[in-house]
Image: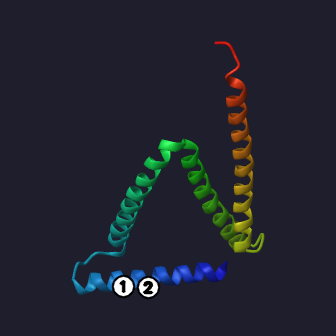
Amino acid sequence: METLLRDMTLIAAQVHGMLMHLNDSFELRLDDKALHFIVMAAIGMVLFFAVHFVFKRLARFSISAISFIYVFTVMTVLGFAIEIGQRITGTGNMDFADVVAGLYGVLAFFGVYTVVRLAGLLLSRLFGGRRKR
C-alpha cells in the first residue's frame, strides 16, 4: 500500500511540475493556490458530467444502483482513510489488502441484500396476483 501511495504521489508531483512549468513558460503568474483552483475545478466538472451522464441512465432502471455506487465510493475512501490513520497513529499496519477485504465485505453484504430483495420481488409477483383488490 505504501508503494501505491508513493507512486500516486510521484505522479501527482510530476503533473504539478509540468503545470508549474507551463505556468512559467506562458508567464501566467498563477500561484499554487490558483493552479489548484483551476485544475480541481476542471477535474470536478469533467467528473460531474461523466457521473451525471451515467447516473441519469442508471436512474431509469433503479435508484438502488446509484445508491450502491455512492456507498461503494464512500467506503473505498473510508477504507483508505482508516489505513492511512493506522499508519499515522501507529495503531496498525497500513495494508492495501485490508482495504480490499473491507470492500469485499461491502460487496458480500450488498449481494445478500440484493438476493433477499429479488426473492421478495419474485414472491410478491408470484403470490401478489391472487389477492382480491
Give 52 or 33, whichever is nearer the viewer: 52
Disc 2: which residue: 14
Residue at image point 67% right, 63% down: 79
| Residue 30 image point, x, y percent | 28, 75
Circle 2 SS class: helix
Q: Is residue 107 left or right of residue 6?
A: right
Quadrant housing residue 127: top right
Residue type, label 2: Gln
Q: Quadrant of the N terminus?
A: bottom right
Q: CA distance from mark 2 to mark 1?
A: 6 Å
Residue type, label 1: Met
Q: Is residue 90 left or right of residue 69?
A: right
Give 17 or 42, whichever is nearer the viewer: 42
User: Does residue 72 lie above or below 91 as drawn?
Assistant: above
| Residue 77 image point, x, y percent | 60, 62
Disc 1: which residue: 18
